[in-house]
Image (spheres, grey):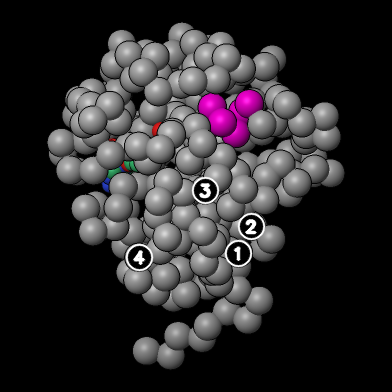
Amino acid sequence: MEAPLIPASLVFRDGTPYSPRHDDIYHSAAGALAQARHVFLDGNDLPARWRGKHGFTVLETGFGMGINFLATWAAWLDDAHRPPTLEYVSIEKHPFRADDLRAAHAAIIDDAAIAPLADALIRAWPLLEGGVHRRTFVAGAVRLTLGYGDAADFLPRLADHGVAADAIYLDGFAPAKNPDMWTPAVFASLARMAKDDATFATFTSAGIVKRALIESGFEYRKLAGFGGKRAMLAGMRASSPRVITS
Ligand SMILES: C[S@@+](CC[C@H](N)C(=O)[O-])C[C@H]1O[C@@H](n2cnc3c(N)ncnc32)[C@H](O)[C@@H]1O
């Protein structure tokens, strides 16, 4: 039996969706889609990295309003050299109600190519019941797996089910505001699911994240952040994983 879900409440702070529960904004005030492209797509070198592959899997921590999903789907559609399938696996502890998601999208989506994808997502939006929900788009070529529940429970379950990620989007609110999304256990699960050539990207460059990345076998580099943030992190599995002796 899954634990009952507590949906997110739609609140705006200075025009940007904000979570009173976590006291943090969902996206940079400088633009949700622009942040998705800068941090998560460019940070994982997409679309270049999916070219020539038979399929490509993105794993995300924190689905939120699905902006990263929509930006990734649009980039995939736009790429003549895209892989035949795009798998997108994400987890969310506090999903929005469909009406709130629609209102949030109306406020923040400023791209005509994305709007129909957002409509399709809302039409397919699962009931707010804990557990795994699967949805397909583009005649089954784009596959969304949404785990409604806590990262601490869901990530090990996804790993047990053999999820194998080509790219990882770390997007779970700021570590200082929401440490639950950045624990060593979360990173250990992500490392289990990362393919040998997997990459990751995140908007934050907090020390706790850098340490967790190193401890779980990733190497990172600092890149220019988005929307006034000095730095973000991106990287891949470490070529010589650190040996932990104690
Ligand atoms: C910054 S938002 C994600 C934005 C999203 N990636 C997008 O593109 O719209 C972070 C999300 O993580 C979710 N979250 C926070 N703590 C969580 C946890 N312990 N387990 C699962 N999801 C969590 C929040 O509810 C929120 O939707």
As drawn, the label of residue 206 is 4
Residue 147, position as x, y percentages in the image = 40, 35
Classify mark 1: helix, strand or loop: strand
Task: Tell me whether the residue at label 1 lies in contact with that at label 2, contact meaning CB atoms closer than 8 angstroms.
Answer: yes
Task: Tell me whether the residue at label 3 lies in contact with that at label 1, contact meaning CB atoms closer than 8 angstroms.
Answer: no
Q: Which stretch did the figure color magenta?
A: 69-74
Task: Tell me whether the residue at label 2 lies in contact with that at label 4, contact meaning CB atoms closer than 8 angstroms.
Answer: no
Residue type highlighted by circle 3? Val
Q: Residue at x 35, y 65 (%)?
A: 206
Q: CA distance from mark 2 to mark 3?
A: 16 Å
As drawn, the label of residue 198 is 2
Residue 140, position as x, y percentages in the image = 67, 20
In depth, the one of 36 and 29 nearer the eye is: 29
| Residue identified by numbered label 1 | 236
How packed mark 3 is, by other alpha carbons closer than 10 Å (few <14, some 14-19, many 20 or more), is: many
Q: CA distance from mark 1 to mark 2?
A: 6 Å
Residue type highlighted by circle 2? Ala
Q: CA distance from mark 1 to mark 4?
A: 17 Å
Q: Main secondary structure of the magenta part?
A: helix
Q: Of discs 2 and 3, which sits in the foreground?
A: 3
| Residue identified by numbered label 3 | 39
| Among numbered discs 4 and 3, the one appearing first in the sequence | 3
Residue 72 lies within the magenta run: yes
Task: Tell me whether the residue at label 2 lies in contact with that at label 3, contact meaning CB atoms closer than 8 angstroms.
Answer: no
The answer to whether mark 4 is within 8 Å of ligand 1 is no
